[in-house]
Amino acid sequence: MARLRCVTRFWHPVADMSAVSASGELLLDRAEGVHVWDESGRRYLDATAALWYCNVGYGRAEIADAAAAQMRRLPAYSHYGDVSSRPTTELAERIAHIAPMEDAVVFFASGGGESIETAVKLVRRYWSLLGRESKTIVISRERAYHGLAGYGTSIVGTDTFTVGVGPIAGGTLRVPWDDPVAFAEAVDRAGAENVAAFFCEPIVGAGGVLAPPPGYLEEVERICRERDVLLVADEVICGFGRVGDWFASSRFAVEPDLVTFAKGVTSGYVQLGGVIVGPRVREPFWAPGAGVWRHGYTYSGHATATAAAHANLDIMEREALPERARALESELADALAPLVSHPLVSEVRAGLGVLAAVQIAPDAIAEEPGLPDRACGLAREHGILTRVLVGGGLQVSPALVIDDAALTELVDGLRAALDDCATR
Ligand code: PLP
């Protein structure tokens, strides 16, 4: 049998490689502000800040300079044991200062997936250190996304991610994304003595941009406290300004035990993630006699990544980007609102943070399941890079520096794509 020819040796993440082979790769070349250019010189408006991460926009030379300077000085060194470097120790201090809980410490990883792995191990081991070994179950919200590493895949729990990979990590269960009573009942059914933590994406991102119903986060926090279940806010998307505060938890005045973060901490200029850990969970690990916690990664606390994070946070502070995001949320919602009258659109979800979804009408999707992907492809033809979320919404989460002209360009491009979609 003839071998399939490879048009690229790069196996793309989350991709249909047969389709990529047929269409070819979109080779991106450079970027500035909220725009990116491909190798042929075509310009696109990046409607999604890449994968929700480029909060400060592209072309920030000071982040590149900070990374380059750190690479020349000390690019990285294993931070196992007692070793650290100035940017890493100081970044932990800086993040603790803006964290949504008092007296926090920070465990670094290389991205969101590793931060989730770390958080699951942390909550389980926490209870084990307290002699409550049965508390291992992790509950999460349906539609939420927590990455595709081992525990992340298990917590997300949907068939699309688990099919064909054999046994995955157990001890996880899901509850409806919008119902605190269902969460309380799930804890009671499982037995609070068996539940370690609730992992909660404050605003569901990849699952469709679903804002929490009024009072939801406050209520799940109360239920966690009442039933002695740890609360883990997965702020990989929400953290670092996107929801109009440093963290969504702060915006909702919720005080989680742990916060997982990644993306916006460096705006993606260099990979970095981690877990912010409150004092309750930290204490038994840091207590005299606790011994070595055998968890960590080669790049935990990578000095170039943490130096880049400082430069990124300098920009966010100087330009008051969390406040800018708060102002932008209604501007974005107003700009997108007219699209709801388009025959292919059933809803525009926007108004909380710089996060929105233009929902392709479910009845139109029922008729043509590939419609959201087709709309997305046509948006690209009209110079807009977006992506399809679970349920068929088009993602709109631009950099926090987007201006009026680019917002207009974004909405016009999406409308043109939808018009084409209706007629082609
Ligand atoms: N958690 C959330 C809320 C995410 O959106 C993501 C990725 O998009 C992750 C975790 C996993 O992050 P990563 O893709 O860096 O592993």
Image: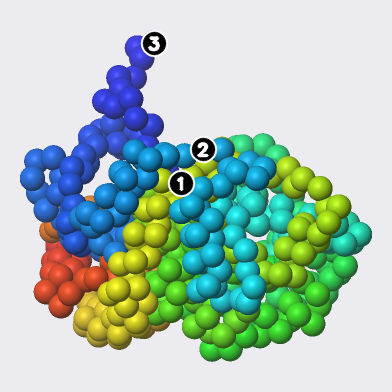
Question: Which one is in front in this view, the residue at disc 3 or the one at disc 1?
Answer: 1
The kind of residue on which mark 2 rests is Tyr
Residue 77's tag is 2
Q: Nearer the viewer, residue 4 or 87?
A: 87
In contact (CB < 8 Å): disc 1 and disc 2: yes
**Mark 2 or 3, nearer chain start:** 3
Q: Quadrant of residue 58?
A: bottom left
Residue 303's tag is 1
**Residue tagged by mark 3?**
1
Left/right placement of residue 410 relative to residue 279 reads: left
Left/right placement of residue 157 relative to residue 322 reads: right
Spatial CA span between label 2 and label 3? 48 Å
Residue 25: where, in percent of width, then height? 24, 37
Residue 162: where, in percent of width, then height? 60, 45
Spatial CA span between label 1 and label 2? 7 Å
The kind of residue on which mark 1 rests is Ala
Specify whether residue 220 is in view. Answer: yes
Left/right placement of residue 67 relative to residue 250 reads: left
Spatial CA span between label 3 and label 1? 49 Å
User: In this picture, is 14 found above or below 346?
Assistant: above
